[in-house]
Image (tube, rainbow, N blue to C red):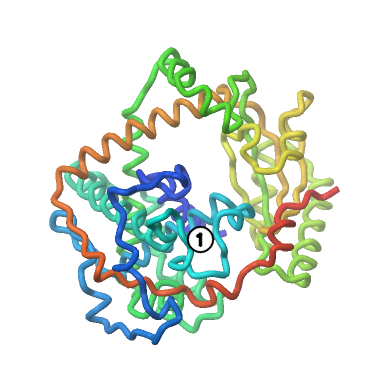
Amino acid sequence: MSNLKRVLICLLCLALCLSVFSACAKPTEDPAAEEPDASETTDDAQQGEEEVVFTEEDWRKPVATLGDHTLDSITLSYYYWTSYSSFLNYYGGTVQQILDLYTPLNQQMYSETMTWEDYFISDALMAFKQYCTLNDLAEAEGFELSETARNTLANAEEELQGIADSMGYESVEDYLIGNYGPYADLESYLDYIHDQFVVREYTSQINTKFTFTDEEVEAYYDEHAEEYAANGIEKLDINMAKLRYIVVMATDQTDENYEFIDEKFNKMLDEWETWEDKSEEGFMAFGEKWSEEGFAQDYLEAVAPGTMNFSYFDDWCFDEPREQGDTRNYFMESGNYFFYYVGETDDVYWRSQASYDMSYDAFTSYMLEEINKYEYQDYVENIIIAQVEDLYTDQLTEEDIAAAIVEEE
């Protein structure tokens, strides 16, 4: 998997990590302070009425300003669909318990006064405020992107062309238009990607400033013990696990494709049986060898019980006799995974989660304080939301989703 493709996948989750009114972190809260009027943001064409044709001038009208920064509907669409994708990524196969994937978002109610389209618009506007603020802070501090980020951005256009080709588009421009609207263009999209790289790396730098003692973390957990227990995070001294994995991804959900990747995966497993070096370094070298065959590898540095969304993984991963070098195969809708158990972390889940939540609260307070230093204005009457091509027709069946994760017996 290319570096940019990894980054694009990560960016789908970035709105989840940064947004104060995150669609994933607190899906039942009503961010009333950011709530657009549903009647003002509805695209008549999406309601089944006579189609409204918007001009380029319409798309470039300001929908929000923050200080000297201006957001139009073109760039708003990048934020909007990133928020939506983050939501789907977070909930996975259970998302249909929350959203009807076959019905336009502006025809589904999030609350008594908000549609789901309004909700994702709200999240996108908050993301705009955060990204502008963080980019300004980073620039003022003289922050520079890592060499890895700079190299990835330098190759972004080429990588995007590869993605467009793999999805059947004739050009990058066609890919962007098909996914973000008729006036999406490479220049504005690359600016958006650049800003998110800055946000991701600069946010990590900010979070290192938030430190807490063990006593403070435990006190925070105890204060929110009922909430944690309701989410299955109990005060148990079970160390998290470190894992590596090799994966071959499914390019589509057809029987032919699954048969193809199953054959490749089984060939890879057969070679592992005779692979001499079964150490962690050996597994990494093995994954590198198979990257030439379209496989990818990655590292999970802190896996906690219950976080992989399928119980039988926990039965294997957290079994007491588990030792470094143990492996397990899992066949899922997204692809076939080969896990390698590295060992335990030095931290337990409840403490790690409480520490993360404390950092999140501290970061949220910090961001609100910085954002409030700007003058902000939105113009929701100018907002245009284009529908992604085939968004409500090219979906998985209920049977597909129900069988999203299937363990190899």
Q: Is residue 254 left or right of residue 214?
A: right
Vertical relation: 144 (above or below) 214: below
Vertical relation: 25 (above or below) 346: below
Q: Is residue 329 left or right of residue 96?
A: right
Query: Dot 1, crowdedness within 10 Å: few (<14), some or many (≥20)?
Result: some
Picture quadrant where residue 382 is located: bottom left
Task: Provide the residue designation for mark 1.
Answer: 5
Pick out the residue farthest to the top: 215
| Point 69% across, 41% down: residue | 282
Residue 36 pos. (x, y %): 30, 59
Residue 151 visible within the image: no
Residue 149 pos. (x, y %): 38, 53
Helix, strand or loop at mark 1: helix
Residue 224 pos. (x, y %): 47, 24
Q: Is residue 159 left or right of residue 130?
A: right
Pick out the residue farthest to the front: 112
Vertical relation: 197 (above or below) 29: below
Asked whether 22 or 46 is in front, the reply is 46
| Point 75% across, 38% down: residue | 278
| Point 74% across, 57% down: residue | 403
Q: Amino acid at mark 1?
A: Lys
Q: Is residue 373 left or right of residue 253?
A: left
Look at the image and tell me in which quarter the N terminus lies. bottom right
Pick out the residue farthest to the right: 409
Picture quadrant where residue 45 is located: bottom left
Residue 116 visible within the image: yes
| Point 27% across, 40% down: residue | 367
Asked whether 43 or 148 is in front, the reply is 43
